[in-house]
Amino acid sequence: MGETKPAGKKKVPLFAIIQGATYKNLRHECAQRIVELDFPGYGIGGLMIGEPSLLTNEMVLTVNQVIPEKNLRYLMGCGYPEDILEAVALGVDLFDCVLPTRNGRTGMAFTSHGKIVIKASRYSTDIAPLDKKCNCYTCLNFSRAYLRHLFNTGEALAGRLVSYHNIYFYTKLMSEIRNHIKKGTFSGFSKRMLRKYDFRNS
Ligand SMILES: [Zn+2]
């Protein structure tokens, strides 16, 4: 059951998805039964849909205590930078989420100093980039005022440029997480970031 399956010419790992809503006993039983079937990786599904983050973390921890360390753990639909940092601490390896592009299309940028809603009037004459600490194409080439102008005139480029920045922001965050895990400094890094980020509630 755990072998790879062909997808066109390439072989890709087949993941099973563990369910069980927010019932600890059902999550545990589902994880045990699916792990017995021996897949290369496991999706953790049915979470990140508005339940309290403490409950999410409890379910993720329950499942990850069953999944062997050699297998990949993928938390489906996660999420905000804070969610990712908390899930990594619980042993999750992979994530996917629409947030960087969905929010980018409506003008919300994830930045190193918090959330920016670029359509706000206070950015109308702001010649700074979205994020002064960012080296992405958008931040190196366009000002906040110009991005706001693109949104206000209905230019499709507006959503693309902010989405590009957001994806760059997430890619950099994941790169930093990997580097800190390798150096054994993830815990301190995560605490610093969690004190700094408040995207979930802002
Ligand atoms: Zn940027």
Image: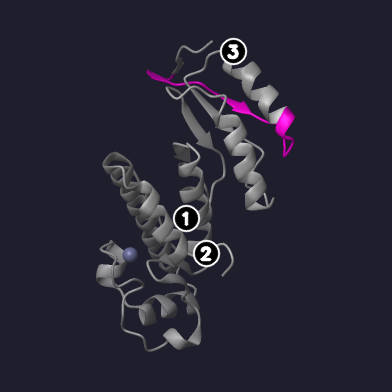
Q: Write down the residue under mark 1.
A: 81
Q: Quadrant of residue 45?
A: top right
Residue 156 visible within the image: no
Residue 155: percent from the left, percent from the top? 45, 71
Mark 3 within 8 Å of ligand 1, using the beta carbon: no
Q: What element carries label 2?
A: loop
Q: Write down the residue under mark 3.
A: 36
Asked whether the residues under the numbered discs 1 and 2 touch, taking CB atoms below 8 Å apart as contact, a structural biologist would say yes
Residue 189 visible within the image: yes
Q: Write down the residue under mark 2.
A: 199
The mark nearer the N terminus, 2 or 3, is: 3
Considering the image in quadrants, where does the C terminus appear? bottom right
Residue 154, compared with residue 178, is above or below; it is below
Residue type marked 3: Glu
Considering the image in quadrants, where does the N terminus appear? top right
Quick check: 47 left or right of 108? right
Residue type marked 2: Phe
Quick check: 43 left or right of 9? right
Looking at the rendering, the stretch of residues picked out in magenta corresponds to 7-25
Residue 105, compared with residue 152, is above or below; it is above
Residue 94: percent from the left, percent from the top? 45, 37
Give the camera-side residue of 194 and 43.
194
Q: How far apart are marks 2 and 3 (CA)?
A: 38 Å
Magenta-span inclusion, residue 87? no
The mark nearer the N terminus, 1 or 2, is: 1
Q: Which residue is drawn at 52% across and 48% down?
A: 97
Give the camera-side residue of 54 and 7.
54
Q: Residue at x 38, y 82 (%)?
A: 145
Q: How far apart are marks 1 and 3 (CA)?
A: 32 Å
Residue 5, compared with residue 115, is above or below; it is above
Q: Distance between the residues labelled 1 and 2?
A: 7 Å
